[in-house]
Amino acid sequence: MKRKLRMGMVGGGNDAFIGAVHRIAAFMDGKIELVCGAFSIDPQISKQSGEDLFVAPERVYLNYEEMIEKESLLPEGERMDFVTIVTPNFLHFAPAKLAMEKGFDVVVEKPMTVSVEEAKELQATVERTGRTLCLTHTYSGYPMVKQAKAMIKEGHFGKIRKIVVEYPQGWLSRLTEREGNAGAAWRADPKRSGKSLVMGDIGTHAAHLAEYVSGLKIQELCADLTTFVEGRLLDDDGSVLLRFENGAKGVLMASQISAGEENAVRIRIYGEKGGLEWANEDPNNLIIKMLDQPRQLYRTGNAYAAPYTLSSFATHNTRVPAGHPEGLLESFANIYRNFASTVTAKREGRTPTPEEQDFPTVYDGVRGMAFIDTVVKNNEGTEKWTKFVV
Ligand code: NAD
């Protein structure tokens, strides 16, 4: 395929937060162009957003139904190839399903849906239609996260025993949802957000990161959710004990009332021979701590000699020479580039490489929704441990 992939957007207008980040990420590698959108719940904002983004006026649609329907009727050489869905959580499922049924691939924000049932229906739709669905678990796109995963996979630390993952934020320390913050308002509304605020908004990122880096699946958990801010309708803080499939134990903390914190995602994993540490606020560093050895610091973009050579997954997702900071936007762009390469490979009848296929999918989305469900169920019930069933 000798052309860019054509992207349509649902949400992401001038009234939105993450949509603009998606566009930066999608455009970074020159493989994707924006051709259409239903950019906002407000048609006027959608129209203005389309104008600002230089989208042809006839391809700025009133709603996602019209967009998907009309785009599907355009000639092959013009119509969009995939839809990016960046609406509040309750508005992910319907456009994702409709898009795949009309022959489009999908990039969708997390949490993938608002229920396990919806998530499983999307999985069934992917399997039936053969479409590609990419879920934007942002933190899995960093080169040093991929290096951590590769080192665990090759047995560098021995059998994994302990996984500690944290995602503290402070921005919901007050009743932000009543202060005119639209993003906080829908997040704190059970009808638009889902069963859990903190686990849907950031806990699923942490759970995905733990499973992605360790290569181990959560099997059982024990959870404690709290609503600290008076008047809030959903939880804003959670601690979860985790049991993984190989006997490893874990701790997950997700909190939006950790006053003063920004996006302090951090993961530490320990095996029999040593451990690692990675943090979103210092993403080009991977700290390696081996028993009886001085600490080592692996840095993005270095051509280390064996046995320290960075994995092909880390180098594939690195853009600039060592020492030049790469961050969230590049990590996000890695997810888009790998998705675009996979979609293109499938269209060309080629099997995508493992590096190209390295992005979160519908199966991660189903696990994310099962995670939220299991946490809420355990928190509300009386049993000590609840099995994580997908
Ligand atoms: P937001 O409230 O800032 O923006 C939502 C956008 O969706 C707005 O443009 C709104 O007008 C539009 N919208 C709502 N209903 C619509 C409809 N029916 N049709 C078309 N557009 C519609 O929200 P946000 O912070 O950008 O979050 C959007 C999604 O992205 C959420 O699911 C959130 O969890 C996720 N998110 C993910 C990350 C990440 O790190 N991956 C970060 C932030 C947000």
Image (cartoon, helix red, strand yellow):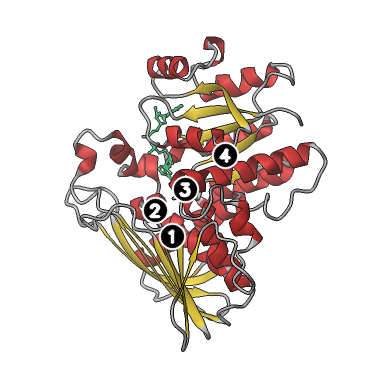
> Could you say which disc has been placed on residue 111 in the image?
3
Disc 3: residue Cβ within 8 A of ligand 1's nearest atom? yes
Do we see residue 386 in this rendering? no
Secondary structure beneath dot 2 equals helix
Category of crowding for the residue at label 4, using alpha-carbon neighbours closer than 10 angstroms: few (below 14), some (14–19), many (at least 20): many
Q: Mark 2 highlights which residue?
A: 202
Q: Residue 232 appears at what percent x and percent y?
A: 23, 48
- Decide if ligand 1 comes within 8 Å of the CB at mark 4: no
Q: Amino acid at mark 2?
A: Ile
Q: Secondary structure at mark 3?
A: loop
Instruction: Name which residue lies at 53% across and 40% down.
Output: 108
Whether the residues at callouts 1 and 2 have beta carbons within 8 Å, the answer is yes
Tell me where residue 375 appears, x and y as whole percent. Answer: 41, 63
Locate the C terminus by quadrant: bottom right
Find the distance from the CA under tag 3 to the CA under tag 4: 12 Å
The residue under label 1 is: 206
> For the residue labelled by badge 1, is the local secondary structure a helix, a strand or a loop?
helix
* Residue at x 44% of width, y 37% of height: 21
Q: Work out whether mark 3 precedes mark 1 in sequence or the reverse, and give the earlier one.
A: 3
Mark 4 is on which residue type?
A: Val
Q: Residues within 10 Å of mark 1 (few under 14, many from 20)?
A: many
Report the residue at 24% width, 49% height from top.
172
Kindly report the distance in space between the C-alpha atoms of the residues bearing marks 3 and 1.
Answer: 12 Å
Amino acid type of the residue that numbered disc 1 sits on in the rendered structure: Ala
For residue 336, say whether it is visible. Answer: yes
Q: CA distance from mark 1 to mark 4?
A: 20 Å
Q: Secondary structure at mark 4?
A: strand
Which residue corresponds to mark 4?
A: 107
Quarter of the image holding residue 149?
bottom right
Q: What crowding class fits label 3: few (fewer than 14 Cα within 10 Å), some (14-19), or many (20 or more)?
A: many
Which tag is nearer the camera, tag 3 or tag 4? 4
Q: Residue furthest right?
A: 349
